[in-house]
Amino acid sequence: MSKLKFQAQAKRQLHVGANTYLYYSVTDGPLAAYHDVARLPVSSKILLENILRHLHTEHCELTALEAVANSHGKGSSQEIAYHPARVLMQDFTGVPAIVDLAAMRAALVARGGDPQKINPLSKVDLVIDHSVSIEKFASSSAYQENVAIEMQRNQERYQFLKWGQGAFDNFSVVPPGTGICHQVNLEYLAKGVWSQTTDAGTLVYPDTLVGTDSHTTMINALGVLGWGVGGIEAEAAMLGQPISMQLPDVVGFELKGKLNEGITATDLVLRVVQMLRQHGVVGKFVEFYGDGLDQLPLADRATIANMAPEYGATCGFFPVDANTLEYLRLSGRDETTIALVEAYTKAQGLWRESGAPAPQFSATLSLDLASVDPSLAGPKRPQDRVPLSAMKQAAEDAIKLSGRDDLSQPFTLAGTDLPMHHGDVVIAAITSCTNTSNPAVMLAAGLLAQKALAKGLTRKPWVKSSLAPGSKVVTQYLAKAGLQPALDALGFNLVGYGCTTCIGNSGPLPEKVTQAVSEQKIHVSSVLSGNRNFEGRIHPLVESNWLCSPPLVVAFALAGTTRIDLSQEAIGQDPAGNPVYLKDIWPSNAEIAALLADITRQQFREQYADVFHGDDNWRAIDAGAGSTYQFDVNSTYIQQPPFFDAAYAGNRADINGAAILALLGDSVTTDHISPAGVIPKDSPAAQYLRSHGVAEQDFNSYGSRRGNHEVMMRGTFGNIRIRNEMVPGHTGGVTRMSGEQQVRFIYDAAMAYQQAQIPTVVVAGKEYGTGSSRDWAAKGTLLLGVKAVIVESFERIHRSNLVGMGVLPLQFKDGDNRQSLQLSGDEHFDILGLAEPLKPNQDIQAVIHYAAGSSKQISLLCRLDTEMEIAYYHAGGVLTYVLNRLAQP
């Protein structure tokens, strides 16, 4: 049967109220002939529909459709093309994506083409949420002051984004001060189903997306399939290119029972992260099922779906059910949309029914919700769960590992009569999309603050406290419940609506705390309700970072230390000197439920009525007009990138004599490769900014300067905690050149190699590229002259980003690694066979030339996983590939 005939026979009608819709059925018609298609995981059925709907295009084939239909939830090497309905962006990753589109327009004009060919073909929403920094805190004016600083610092970036909103079709910007992109997506942007007008009628299909932030996965709680990609892949998707991927395994995660009294969704997700990391789900879908979902409200599901990058999965998916519809109604979606979601998902077999047989999965795990206990995770990885009762020991172990042995030693904090100690909490932040999207834990934090205040407790003077909700709805229901005054009294005043501490925008510590920590070398900690706690991410002076629920954030701010067992020890004393325990101030489920009942549909509708309009500051920005952007050569925020220059035009030759630029260990994160936070004052990026007249107080962050490749390439491998094994005893972005002993910045060494026309490689261990979907981790690698990255294993997003930028991802084979091959950094690599036609996942031969004169040939696995990725690599990256196609007459 031809593709078109197959597609035509799958078309069906759906009647909802007075409306008639068309859809492509995956449950009957020609697909009904496939074995057990009805028992496919719901996420697999969505992929199946996606391929079926695009069978008329060049990228979707019947072989891919048949592979999914017959998969039984198991992955394979079959290449499939995924066409997301829309793209979600935030400003840190979105600015460079729009810069690339502007540069692509300029390059197309230079080739004599029409710039209007460069336009998003699907809906793109960019939410400005990553630029607010906690400069001011614990005051009623903190929010207004932080907004003013944000607008002043980021005027150029915001002007550029506003130009993009006018210049590109299908591109909308949610202004700063609105909320975090994933929460805005969950509460407003997502529809559950999407539709388009065709000649035959209105076609309805699942709402799907990709996003330029790894926590895009949060939307899977709503039954919307989506995940994070690099800005590079997102740009390609915007321009009509499918996401090329191998058919993934779908791992089933059964939830049974019900959470016990006082247990939060944060406790649950930390347990889930630990279990799935231990099982191994990198590159796989995880789909949750089981009757425990009946007891799990959508906000709790969102917490679990949000942290899919932390457990390593492509996504953590929850099928649509009655709880989904209840949330759609509460969050203000119209009744027509809700009715369509219900009718469509039931017709397509995408609806979850309690007691229904489980789908077929590649593997399964099971968790009794009643077994979950209060937990934190840290001090530097989200999967390292620590029960609350073991927190004191875990904190002290981390301190000892950092070389501090005298845990009883007191330290002076100027201006107070209280001494500081190792393990003290200097940052307590209710932050991030993970938990501020969940009313239950936010109300719990407010109730705990209220009870603590009634007991006479206060936060310790060295704690920088903050509250950064994911949307204005949170502010509204906290105020309505009468809880915000108690939070304010403990220093948890509103500081902004955005990612703040979780992305490293913690702002400075108070001067007296900075002085004490810096001069006395105190090992201090942060507690935050976020999803990331990687080294060097939260704050340069903070060595241990612990993830926990919002009420626990408040509790640790009151205790002032992580060296406490809050399950047994008193958190403080009341005015009469009586001990106060955590159990004395922990809110009951009934108290939380009573306040949850007061959250209304109208609150959501009011806050999202003018979501795209912004405040007076946003509306006052003069963005200019025109289809091409006039880059300012003097700007330190927005520069025209060189990715379309001839030097990056293609890859069809062997790599010979490549030096090792960096030799790294396991679990190198994208934060290590491309930090997002503060720009160190002695770094190459700081030197560049000073040379352009930027004062140190105006350096801003790496994340805010992602539109300027000159800053970002200088920051690549610049994390203050990264450890290059070529220079033992040193931390930070330093290396040495082959055959030399002089320690220099990685950027300086890379430029010296480029001047000498010597290619370079990066060598590392397992789990290379964990964490955020940071496209600059790949872009910066390319601009430093790195031709290949050779590791033991990759995390999914970063590997695809490397391919997208034309950097070759290679994996060691046959038990080889940097240790077994005795690599010191003085070796040179020849990578052979690249001039020949390549196949997905083929072996590549490499020759290692040792400094002593010997050599060794090894086999490497080439992680170009699909034919499309090979095409991207040969073109020099996906952007050049798309440009070449658009430039054709």
Image (spheres, grey):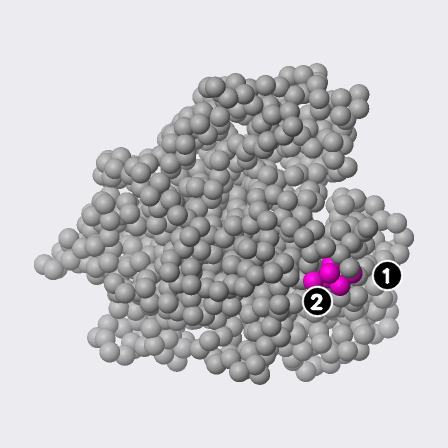
What span is in magenta? 106-111
Q: Is residue 71 magenta?
A: no
Nearest the eye: 231 or 265: 231
Circle 2 or circle 1, nearest the eye: 2
Element class at badge 2: loop
Q: Is residue 88 left or right of residue 745?
A: left
Mark 2–mark 1 CB contact (< 8 Å)? no
- Coordinates of residue 362 in the picture (x, y in percent): 63, 31
**What percent of the width, then of the height, locates residue 212?**
57, 51
Q: Residue 642: which numbered mark, if any?
A: 2
- Residue 50 visible, this orientation: yes
Q: Is residue 821 left or right of residue 429?
A: right
Which residue type carries mark 2?
Answer: Pro
- Residue occupying image coordinates x 75% and y 63%: 110
In the rendered image of this protein, does residue 867 appear above or below residue 92? above
Q: Could you tell me if residue 347 is visible in this image?
A: no
Is 77 in front, or is 725? Answer: 77
Q: Residue at x 48, y 19 (%)?
A: 18
Q: Secondary structure at mark 1?
A: loop
Name which residue type carries label 1.
Answer: Asp
Real-space Cα separation, disc 2 to disc 1, in angstroms: 23 Å
Residue extending furthest left? 576
Q: How many marks?
A: 2
